[in-house]
Image (cartoon, rainbow, N blue to C red):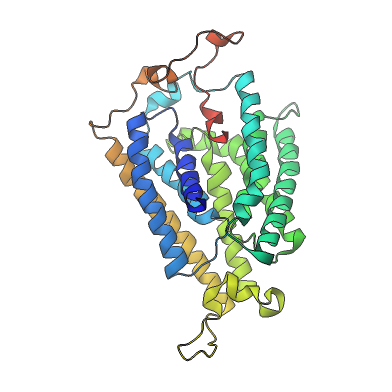
Amino acid sequence: MMSADFVAAAVLISFGAVLGKTSPLQLLVMTLIEVVLQQLNEYIGVHELKVSDVGESMFVHAFGAYFGLAVARVLYSDKVEESNKEGSIYHSDLFSMIGTIFLWIFWPSFNGGAATGDEQHRAVINTLFSLTACTFITFAVSSILHKRGKFEMVHIQNATLAGGVAVGTCANMPMGLWGALVIGTVAGILSTVGFKYLTPFLASKAKLHDTCGVNNLHGMPGILAGLAGAVMAALATADDYGPSLQEIFPARGEESKNGTASSGRSASVQGGYQMLALIITLAIAIVGGALTGLILKLSVFDGPDDDDLFDDGKHWEVADDGFDGCDKQPINDANNMTNM
């Protein structure tokens, strides 16, 4: 069940990049392909490279984000930018915040669920402190970037969670509370600035439309997590880790067939393998996503017409009333869907 939860998270993240621009059939085909590639990539990282990624920030968040972004780039159409149906309304923003609060509370369990003992204890605490620092800095940066000093809802709904992503790879490592606070702070700044400036830049210059900003919440923080994990692995010593060293990094202390301990990998070599796992993850995600996008462009998998972009009405019975001003607002709340 835990493994299924991780895989489902990767698919959900990828959906965030293409939401409102794909049909249910396209999403189904995309899911079937991504599940296979995500599990293949994780097998390579965990069993072949023997790297540590307890919170799956590389294998779930970074993979899911850049797989979805690659699909979105291949499926890009100028009509996407011209559509006026993408957006949110006041009520949906409030509803989406319920999802944000749930994820904030859930994230320590997500990062620590696969660990045991002291590792799990560290994972929960490190994630909590990283999320806390990230939340503080997100509110601050959101206000600074607004010309009138106001908070932007999209930042609060998303960037406040980036600290949980960024600390995921090394959450079970003894980084100290200051380490978790630094990672959460950097993640909050990176994500908020990304939502403010990078998302519109990619849409206008690179023709990469990211519906839910998964690059800002999952992609860049996922890369930050991989880098943090590589640094922590390269600095890991038996004095700091104790018995946890071999538990977190099995290749550091493998035993030979006669039962005697071998030296295994050095700290720097383990750090190199962590970096290699991140690079392989990005490569499989981007190439796999691009090929999947080409498959989805086949006529047999018809996407939505230009008039149906960001419109739920073609596949769902959508109420015409129930909220004041509903008929004047966008039908599809694409920016907030991944928070639920």
Residue 318 in the image, given as x and y percentages of width and height: 47, 14
Q: Is residue 298 above or below residue 7?
A: above
* Residue 19: quadrant of the picture: top left
Q: Is residue 262 above or below residue 1?
A: below
Residue 104 in the image, given as x and y percentages of width and height: 67, 42
Q: Is residue 173 visible?
A: no
Residue at position x 44%, y 38% from top? Answer: 206
Closer to the camera, 226 or 323?
323
Residue 99 in the image, given as x and y percentages of width and height: 62, 34
Q: Is residue 70 visible?
A: yes
Quadrant location of the C terminus in the rendered image: top right
Tally of marks? 0
Q: Is residue 169 left or right of residue 287?
A: right
* Residue 322: quadrant of the picture: top right
Residue 215 in the image, given as x and y percentages of width and height: 52, 43
* Residue 323: quadrant of the picture: top right
Q: Is residue 286 above or below residue 198?
A: below
Q: Is residue 291 left or right of residue 202?
A: left
Closer to the camera, 209 or 328?
328
Q: Is residue 145 left or right of residue 297?
A: right
Closer to the camera, 151 or 89?
89
Q: Is residue 272 above or below residue 67?
A: below
Residue at position x 66%, y 29% from top? Answer: 153
